[in-house]
Image: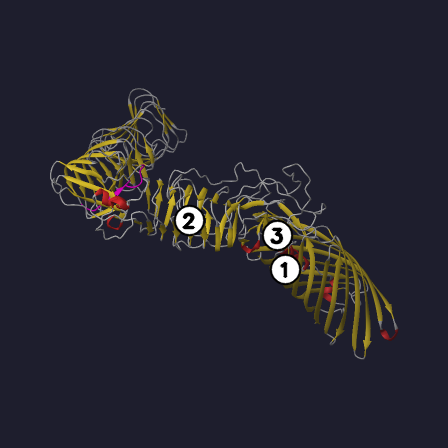
Amino acid sequence: MKSGDDTLTLSGSNTYTGGTLINGGTLVASNVEALGTGDVTDNATLALNTGGTFDNAISGSGQVVKSGDETLTLSGTNSYTGGTTISGGTLVATNVEALGTGSVTDNATLELNTSGTFDNVISGRGQVVKSGDKTLTLSGANSYTGGTTISGGTLVASNVEALGSGDIDNYASLQLNASGQFVTANLTTHDNAITAIGAGSALRANTLTQEANSTLAVHLTDSNSGAIVTADRANLGGTLDITGIGNVAKSWTRDAYAYTLIDSDSAIDSDFAQFTVAGMDAKQVDFLTVDGRVNADDDTRYDVTASLSWYADSDNAATDAHGTFTLSEQGHSFTLNTALTDVDATLNPDSATDWDGKSLIKRGAGTLILGAQNTYSGDTDVQEGALWLAETATIGSAGSAQAVNIAANAAFGGHNATVNGHVNNLGNLYFVDTFTVNGDVVNSSAMISGSDQPNNTLTIAGNYTGNDGHLYLNTQLGDDSSPTDKLIVTGDTAGSTTLHITNVNGLGAQTVNGIEVIEVGGQSDGDFRLYKGHVDINAWTYTLKQDGGDWYLRSESDDVPDDGGEVTPPDDGGEVTPPDDGGEVTPPDDGGEVTPPDDGGEVTPPDDGGEVTPPDDDGEVTPPDDGGDITPPDDGGDITPPDGGDVTPVAPQYRADIGVYLGNQWMARNLQMQTLYDREGSQYRSADGSIWMRFKAGKAESQAVNGNVDIDSDYSQFQLGGDILTWSDGAQSVTVGLMGSYINASTDSTGNRGADGSQFSANGSVDGYNLGLYATWFADAQSHRGAYIDSWYQYGAYNNSVDNDGLSASRYDSAAHAVSLETGYRYDIALSNRNTVSLTPQAQVTWQRYSADTVIDDGGTRISGQNDDSWTTRLGVRVDGKLYKESGRIQPFMEVNWLHASDNASATFGDTKVSQDLPNDRVEVKVGIQANVSERLSVYAQAAGQKGKNDYGDASFSLNMRYNW
């Protein structure tokens, strides 16, 4: 603690950690480590006469003084209130709060290498340097006189006094962004730097210098009445970029605009080398006549004139009037909030444009935004890029018969807007919130919801014809009351249209009437088809059904539901990941947070030639976040009809790929199962060891979700093993070996039939490897009569694939552990001629642990819940004979088993658990024969079958070969 009125200097490199308290006088630190590593409470004066980085946190009511010639950096978040004085060297602040909350007296150099808003008031004769690549805002009424240097990043002045009164040297980016006039000495924008004067801002400088390759950006508004820049002298060069034109309310009238950009006390030296409008070369902006130059009659003034080409003849502009709007650069937009009306009566008869004065053409990859009630009566041709109608904007007068023609690779649409006329669509027609066409629509390409949430409506107050067109809608897939986008046609429909549905936070549910997505008021002859015939979410499949002329999304089978099922309904929505199609068609943006349409990754919308940058009309479209306050559908249970009457119970239609996920799981588990006799055969020898191989192939049939999904699997397995250790004391023996196998299985799955007769299928496969070891003990080492115990362990790793009828394709990994313990007792019955018959009762228990990756499919469904344990027990009896034929032996056998399983294969789709209908109890029969090819080589062939409830069946054939050393 420093107390008293004297001055104390600490010069050592101290390491104390308890902090420093200054209650009186002055504490001088002449070493950056003099105050240890603790916090500093400064209630008097802390003088830092050193260099380096001082990162101790400083608080208290005192002041900080930077002295000496070195450079000192303050990096902490400091809260001291007594102010900062810089009397020598350079003080660098790398934290916007490094200098506490008091004022700064800068009599040397203050360097700000940070971001955020610096609110401290700066005075003194020193200079301020902005360094680093970040953006920093100066907001105080500053009075320092040493000048300002911007060496990196962006410096924003949000107060007209923020930059003091000295010279300004800009080597990076300076933004003057405060209402009123900035007054400075000299302002120089150096090579490759940019100085931007924002809306409502003005500048007074002794000398304005724009060096070669620099940029002066000025935002003009209709409120600019005087000169934007006044100076004693102006030296011009580089680029002049005018913004604001066309982007302010009521930005255009029939009169041309004229601005005085620069008013100099002396003749303006030179001129800008390039003139751009919102970054676009002014010569390429054909819809505006924009010119900037030194006034021919007064060389102390630099003037900018601008007029809309639509009204050029009535404005007496230098160019002829025309109705073409070309925005060449993708990402650029132009907002026009003044109505376009017919001007055919004022056209110059000698015009070379051959324009009719009442039609509009949109060209170029940029976006034109119309924000007014436009009454021009000619056609609108969107040939390139995008034309967007901002909120409440219109094209045409009521009852107009004009047409909007959307070319291929072009986009048109709007937010709460209206077209009074017809629409011929060869490109993309977007709609947000409500969009009305009071006329006929011919759709030869795509009509797309321009929001990423449902409840957007496209209303066609006329007839609709689909010319192999597409319609993209967002729906929260659930029950009948689910939010959805909608197409409303008050007239007739004809032709063919493919409907693409993007699920937005829906969990799936059973429906009754369905979710209405298309409403038809007239003759409903149009053929609407759902892409791929169905859309899936969680365990549910939805199809498109026409009913009474309207079209509905329904999840409904043709069967009465079974109340004994093993389907766990969704609850709170779980973690459903929204789909993403990765497309590059971005709809125009009317100011809301509009996200381009997403078809779930199933179909890429027609290409509009690039990424159209959304315009902004202050719309209020808010995209969904995490589901918000949207009440998820229930579990598809009891549904009360609107009138309270009786509803015939219906069952949902389940997605077909349920069977593939469950089939892959069952095949991996099933192909780990084996018995001692499957591996060893019937012929035993007391040998030093053996090597064996086994091939198995078969077919399995089962069901899932209470018989609603059929599963058919074909499988094969190649297994190889060998004994690595044998032991015998003459009476009993133990054998230990290693084994490995490759498995491959393919599964075809068919979902239940929908109420409309639809039925869908999926397919997939699993392949991988099992590695393990086995150990067998025989009480009788010679003949293997009597008791035995066999055990084995296997680990398997597998690759899985699922193809859901083209809707989605998934790849995932899985693994399984298995441990088995088997025992039995063999009885031999002697026959004549050395022949014998053996009877072997057996018992086996097997534990398995299966796990699989979580999958999020292309439709947004999260498939998980495949990590589970299971137990399988087996009780059986085996009868085999040993028949001697000349020098060889033939051993026919038959085995009957009762298998009992503790658990089904299951998975969770979203929050809906589904299970395979595997019977708990199965009967298995095996028959086969083994023959000795030689004393050491034997061949073993077996056919096996299993049968159980729920139409479960399995048939296989295997072939073994064994060689004894």
Q: Residue 214 or 303: which is nearer the viewer?
A: 303
Question: Where does the image place residue 507, in percent across and percent down from the top left?
Answer: 58, 44
Of badges 2 and 3, nearer the viewer stands: 2
Is disc 1 surrounded by few (<14), some (14 to 19) or many (20+) residues within 10 Å? many
Marker disc for residue 748: 1
Q: Give the amino acid at mark 3.
A: Arg
* Mark 1 or 2, nearer chain start: 2
Instruction: Let me know if residue 363 is in the magenta part.
Output: no
Please indicate whether residue 4 sits to the left or right of residue 906 in the image.
left
Instruction: Using the numbered discs, state the Cα–Cα distance from disc 1 to disc 3 in whole angstroms.
Output: 13 Å
Q: Residue 810 or 247: which is nearer the viewer?
A: 247
Quarter of the rendering occupied by the C terminus: bottom right
Q: Residue 734 or 278: which is nearer the viewer?
A: 278
Overall secondary structure of the magenta stretch?
A: loop
Please indicate whether residue 46 sits to the left or right of residue 483 in the image.
left
Would you say the residues marked 2 and 3 are in contact, meaning their CB atoms lie under 8 Å apart?
no
Residue bearing mark 3: 655
Asked where in the image residue 607 lies, by quadrant, the reply is bottom left
- Write down the region rendered in magenta: 237-249
Question: Which element carries disc 1, helix, strand or loop?
Answer: strand
Q: Give the amino acid at mark 1.
A: Asp
Question: Where does the image place residue 932, in percent across and percent down from the top left?
Answer: 75, 74
Q: Give the amino acid at mark 2.
A: His
The residue furthest right is: 832
Question: Where does the image place residue 23, in percent across and percent down from the top left?
Answer: 34, 21
* Mark 1 or 3, nearer chain start: 3
Residue bearing mark 2: 422
Is disc 3 surrounded by few (<14), some (14 to 19) or many (20+) residues within 10 Å? many
- Residue drawn 64% across the image and 37% down it: 643
